[in-house]
Image (cartoon, rainbow, N blue to C red):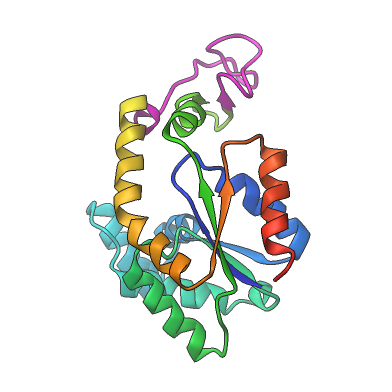
Amino acid sequence: MIIVLLGPPGAGKGTQAKEIQARYGVAHVSTGDLFRAALKEDSDLGRTVKGYLESGGLVPDDVTCAMVAQRIGRSDCAKGFMLDGFPRTVGQAQALDVLLGSRGLRLDAVAYFDVTEATAVERLGGRLTCRCGAGYHAKYMPPKEAGKCDRCGAALTQRTDDLPETIRKRLRVYEEQTAALIEEYGRRGLLRRVDANAAPEAVTAAVFAALDSL
């Protein structure tokens, strides 16, 4: 099974990726994880990616595609994989088609996690972090004492990109970037729309219903 996970920040893709991995045994290939690994990797590709990220520039499609190609060649992808964060544009989707075709593979489905702006803002806007690495949520996983880390007692903070107005801007950018891609996958009959506003368990059930027939 080869699938793409599409959805804006706050749609819960990371949570559902774990459920998909457990049920179907496919590898989770996240471009975010690949980029973070590249920052620590001393290789030609790693240094190339690091240069773009540290300069604040966007990693070009061909470099991202090369990273994905390298990642899906690993043994854990032999039984299938899900792509999270790639593709995000029609151009990247076309590059993915070429990559898969060169290996005798094809894309089976695209799970689109459809979430409202209000839900995304609530989920992301409630996130709290500690310098020790612990994470919380003001509503869904609050600390025992407001504003303090359960683990070390330090003050909890909110990332600037989790402020409501910043989140709304991120959502608008995502929508503008992926609108044509969603339309393209819908036209090809690959899109499986999932209501991601529901509770995690309900979203998981909807995802399984969409993918079990593949």
38 in relation to 130, above or below: below
Q: What is the magenta segment's predominant secondary structure?
A: loop
- Residue segment shown in magenta: 136-163
Image position, residue 21 (x, y; %): 70, 59
Residue found at x 44% / y 76%? 96
Q: Residue furthest right?
A: 23
Residue found at x 52% / y 70%? 189
Image position, residue 182 (x, y; %): 42, 60
Image position, residue 64 (x, y; %): 38, 69
Whether residue 179 sits left or right of residue 69 in the image: it is left
Residue found at x 45% / y 26%? 125
Q: Residue furthest top?
A: 145
Using the image as rendered, state which of residue 147 and residue 92 is in the foreground.
92
Q: Quadrant of the N terminus?
A: bottom right
Q: Quadrant of the C terminus?
A: bottom right
Using the image as rendered, state which of residue 91 and residue 147 is in the foreground.
91
Residue found at x 51% / y 30%? 123
Image position, residue 40 (x, y; %): 44, 58
34 in relation to 108, above or below: above
